[in-house]
Image (cartoon, rainbow, N blue to C red):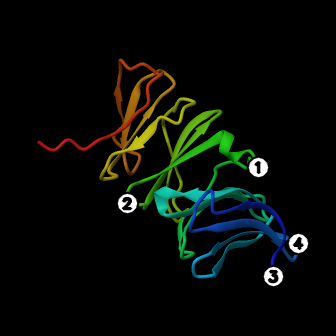
């Protein structure tokens, strides 16, 4: 049984999900219950901290920020059947304020994650399982205006010079496109002729 829950998300947030951050044996947990079936999943346990557990429509599940016993921190995403979609470890330890320092963008194929760090501005790519983090020579702006191409082969973002930068999914072949207003928001649509 769980006890000492700190956060509870319920039917008003997602009609198919009850989620909570709890404590088991003195360690933090992230858990969900599917009320229609009564299925209960412990998504993560033994953590030092959990924050921001919320429904995530992009993966048809939930995501949350975490800090482990080694003080590493990041964000995980799980489907409602308890399958981990991504496990992102942030380059620097910033828990519990990681969401104010980093923004992450999961590719459409859910294989690659772009991590935008705001201060100092940096860009990282990594596999969705958390492996292979690579720093990209770029300076993303303090903005959430970044987007993957529909096929996930390229990533575009606003840089600190108000230009749009486009890089391939491996972090190579950077292209700078100038003449944009930084007050805009990027989107990427497929245009079939």
Q: Give the vertical position of 74 relative to 20 (above or below).
A: above
- Percent position (x, y) of residue 155? 39, 43
- Dividing the picture into quadrants, the one containing residue 111 is bottom left
Q: Nearer the viewer, residue 80 or 83?
A: 80
Dot 4 crowding, Cα within 10 Å, few <14, some 14–19, many 20+: few
Q: Which residue is mark 3?
A: 1
Q: Which residue is mark 1?
A: 96
- Percent position (x, y) of residue 169? 37, 50
- Who comes first in sequence, dot 2 or dot 4? 4
In-image side of 137 versus 68 (left or right): left
- Who comes first in sequence, dot 3 or dot 4? 3
Mark 3 secondary-structure assignment: loop
Dot 3 crowding, Cα within 10 Å, few <14, some 14–19, many 20+: few
Mark 4 secondary-structure assignment: loop
- Who comes first in sequence, dot 2 or dot 1? 1
Q: Residue at x 67, y 62 (%)?
A: 10
- Who comes first in sequence, dot 2 or dot 3? 3
Gap in angstroms between the C-alphas marked 2 and 4: 37 Å
Q: Nearer the viewer, residue 21 or 10?
A: 10
Gap in angstroms between the C-alphas marked 1 and 4: 18 Å
Q: Nearer the viewer, residue 14 or 93?
A: 14
Q: Are marks 2 and 4 in contact (CB under 8 Å)?
A: no
- Percent position (x, y) of residue 70? 78, 63
Q: Residue at x 69, y 46 (%)?
A: 98
- Percent position (x, y) of residue 142? 57, 30
Q: Which residue is mark 4?
A: 26
- Who comes first in sequence, dot 3 or dot 1? 3
Q: Which residue is mark 2?
A: 109
């Amino acid at each position: 049984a769980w006890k000492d829950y700190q956060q509870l998300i319920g039917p008003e947030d997602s009609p198919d999900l009850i989620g909570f951050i709890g404590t088991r044996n003195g360690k933090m947990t992230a858990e969900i219950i599917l009320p229609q079936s009564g299925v209960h999943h412990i998504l993560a346990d033994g953590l030092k901290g959990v924050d921001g557990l919320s429904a995530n429509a992009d993966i048809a599940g939930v995501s949350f920020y975490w800090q482990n016993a080694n003080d590493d921190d990041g964000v995980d995403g799980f489907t409602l059947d308890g399958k981990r979609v991504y496990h992102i470890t942030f380059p620097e330890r910033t828990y519990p304020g990681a969401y104010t320092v980093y923004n992450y963008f999961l590719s459409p194929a859910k294989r690659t994650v772009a991590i935008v760090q705001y201060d100092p501005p940096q860009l990282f790519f990594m596999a969705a399982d958390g492996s292979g983090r690579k720093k990209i020579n770029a300076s993303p702006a303090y903005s959430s205006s970044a987007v993957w191409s529909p096929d996930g082969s390229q990533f575009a973002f606003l840089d600190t010079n108000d230009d749009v930068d486009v890089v391939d999914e491996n972090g190579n072949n950077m292209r700078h496109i100038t003449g944009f207003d930084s007050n805009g928001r990027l989107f990427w649509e497929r245009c079939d002729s």
